[in-house]
Structure formats: C-alpha cells, structure tokens
Image: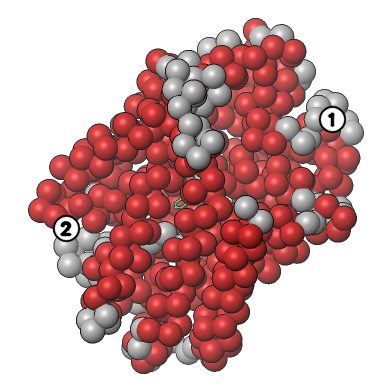
Amino acid sequence: MATKTGEGFSSSFGAIMAAAGSAVGLGNIWRFPYICGKYGGGAFLIVYIVFVLFIGMVLMMGEFVIGRRSGEDPMKAYPALKPKRPGWKYVGLAGLMTCFLILAIYLVISGWTLNYFWESLTGRLAGIADSDFGEHFKQFASSAGRPLLCVAIFLALTALVIVGGVDKGIERVSKLLMPILVVLLIALCVRSLTLEGASAGLSYLFKPDFSKLTGEGVLAALGQALFSLSVGMGVMIVYGSYLPKDDNILKTSLWITVCDFAIAILSGVAIFPAVFACGQDPTGGPGLVYQVLPVVFNSMGTIGRIFSITFFLLLSLAALTSAISLLEALTQWFSGKRLGRTGSALTVSLLVIFLAAAASFSFGDGIWSGFKIAGMSLFDLLDKLTGTILPPVCALMTIIFFGWVMNKEDIIDELSNHGMVKIGYFKLFYHILARVVAPLALLIVLVAGIIGG
Ligand code: PHE
C-alpha cells in the first residue's frame, strides 16, 4: 500500500481516471478554446504541445515519483526524500496554499456552471432574448445569494466524494464520470460540426496565424499547460502517493496527458464551429461560455436546449473531478493533523467557502467589488495569482528538487518499479528535460512575466 494511512487507488485504470479527472476541467473546456483562438490557433497549438510534452508531462512524472516514493502528503514528502534538507517542506506548503486559492476561485466558476446547468434544465435560459445574455450573466454573477448557494451545493458534492475515500470515493466517481464526459463531448462535437458554416470555426481554431502568437501568448501557453495538467502545486504528489506500486509511471502520465489534450481539442471543436455557424463573436474571452454560447444554443431551437443542458452538465462534471483533487490534496494534509478524513474535509470546506464567498462578492458589480488590493478586486487578484504567478513558481521549485536535490537512484528505482520496467528514455528525460529544459523554460517564463508586469 502506498501511503502511510494505507489508502490508495485500487488499479492503474482507476488511477488514470482519477488523475485525468483532475487534469480535465474548466481549464480544458472553458479556458483552452478561447486562448487558443486568441493567440493564433494552430500557431498556439504547436507551442502548447511542446510545453505539455516537455515541461508539463515531465513535472507530472516528477510529482508522481515524489509522491509514490515518499508515500506522504506534499509537505512531508520533500523532507522524507531528503531528510538533511527539511526546508524543502515549504515548497510543499506553498503548493498546498496555491491549491487552496485555486479551489476558492474554481468553486466560484463551478457555481456559475451549475447555475447555468439548472437554468438550461428549467428552460429559463431559453426564455432570454439574445441581446440580454450579457446583462443576465453580469446580474447573476454580481449578486450575492444565488452564486453563493451554487458554490455551497457544488462544494457539498465535492466533499461528499472525498469523505467516501480514495478508492471508494474519488476513484469510483472518476471511473463513472470520465467516460460520460467523453460521450457527451463527442455528441456535442458531432452536432457542432454538422451545422452549416461550421468549417469557419475549425479554421479559426486550427489554422496557424503566427502574427497573433505574441510573447504574451507563449506565456499563456505555458501557464495553460501547467494549469491544465494540474501540475506544479502538489496535486499529482498526492495522487502519486496513492498510485499502485506496480504502476508504470511513464505510461500512466502519457495516458493522462493524451486525455487532457484530446479533451481540450474536442472542446474547441464543440464550441467554435457552433459559434461561427451562429454568427457570434469567437473572441468572447472568458464570457464565451456564459454569454455567447447561450445565444448559440437558443438559435438552434429545441435541439439547442438539449445541447445547452448537455454542455453545462459536461462542464459541471469536469469541474467536479478537478475540484475533488484540490480538496483531496488539502484533506490529505489536514488528516495528517489527527482530524481524520471526514473532519479534515469538513474543516477545509468551511475555510475555503469563506474565501470563495469573498471572491464571489468581489466579482463584477458585486457587493465587495469596491474593495481593491493592489488595484484589483479579490476575484481578479486570485485569478492572476493562481493563473499566472503561483503555479510556475511552485513548478520551478518542484522540478529543481526533482532534478537537482533528490537522489538519482531513488528516481531510477521508482520509474523502473525496482528494475521491473525498462526505462530507456531515462537519459533524455532526466539529464536533458528534468534538469535543464524544464527549469530553464520555467525560469524564463517567470522572469519575462515579472518584467512584463
Ligand atoms: N487541471 C484543472 C483544469 O484544467 C485545474 C486544476 C489545477 C486542478 C490544479 C487541480 C490542480 O481545470
């Protein structure tokens, strides 16, 4: 059994589903399509793929190794592997703090998604005039009660799964939800692609336009690669500690990466052809999903209603399996503090809902929107910290530990399952990617990000 508490995933398939569930989330369906379109479609894709494979996946394997080797939560894992350097525990702690902040903002957006699912189901969205969707979203997201209620419901669902345990809760739910998600997404793609004028959407998404791929676009590609694969903040250390001992870390990481990438691409294919076919603005940015897509759905008549229900259900499920991994990381850490699984999950939930509520109230014209920190509302500050600053910082520290501090023999032993699996890729992976390419790329992005403001 992997962890000290004896908890773990029961099979490799279950582990892949759970970790892919963490990776596939709002980042793939809500964020990827609009930034891919914004920064030059195919041009962005090329850079993104390079970052995913050579930085994101390397980090994922590194986190799995750290987690499984130590069998500990992120804060204890580093010192467990390098007892002479106890200060590394702060990297684990920084990752967990980042998880906490991401979870708060994630809950707010997941709450919106749940609300839109409900409004599609009850027909409320279908009754809104096209020109009013912008106002509808603004009014809803800036109000106090309803978004908070949605956050609470979403968090309660997440916590319920966590209380169920690693294999009976997280693994079981992921094994059920991930295949449903793929089926729903493929159905949406088919419908979207068969609309008249769909091809314009495909060329927007895939045709490379290098003039749009700015320095900012390259930074966005790296940020997105880390966020989408859930790497850098320790979530994969946690899931790594639950990996079966005979699991092949390279294979598992490859599967997760491929799933995550495929779902991001499919989301673009589901969204853009429909947006173009209905003559809507593809550069809707973050509002695309809540302001532009409902117009698209409404213009499709009855089938649009089914489309809408399916889409928001899909988005809610994807968000749920990601929120589960964030809450689990924090719960595992708290459990180490003698609270037990249920007590820890409840404690973290109580703490995080305060921050989520504050973030929600500060959004748009919300009741706390006048309160600014460094010129930003709390929501915008959290968005910036968790989207562009903290994950690369934590990722850089993690990869430095993995490549330069941790014992090489431990890594070889863990990747090869004590010599049972061939690791011919090790030289390239360790000496080139983990020690040089990934840390340098992360450093450059961070410095460029800081200089660029
Ligand atoms: N990967 C998730 C997504 O794409 C978000 C996430 C980030 C989840 C970090 C866990 C940890 O939406």
Q: How many numbered circles are shown?
A: 2
- Indicate the quadrant where residue 344 lies: top left
Left or right of 3, for residue 95: right
Question: What is the x, y in percent for residue 107?
Answer: 42, 35
Please give the label number shown on residue 336: 2
Separation of residues labelled 2 and 1 (CA atoms): 53 Å
Residue at x 58% of width, y 10% of height = 124
Disc 2 beta carbon < 8 A from ligand 1? no
Question: What is the x, y in percent for residue 226?
Answer: 54, 59
Please give the label number shown on residue 265: none
**Numbered disc in front, either 2 or 1:** 2
**Residue marked by disc 1:** 277
Q: Give the class, few, some or many, for how many residues have Cα within 10 Å of label 1's Cα (few <14, many ≥20).
A: some
Q: Earlier in the sequence, mark 2 or mark 1?
A: 1
Label 1: state its secondary structure: helix
Q: Nearer the viewer, residue 294 or 357?
A: 357
Q: Is residue 18 above or below residue 204?
A: below
Question: What is the x, y in percent for residue 219?
Answer: 66, 58
Let me know if residue 33 appears in the view.
yes
The N terminus - image quarter: bottom left
Amino acid identity at mark 2? Gly
Q: Nearer the viewer, residue 361 or 130?
A: 361
Label 2: state its secondary structure: helix
Question: What is the x, y in percent for residue 366?
Answer: 49, 20
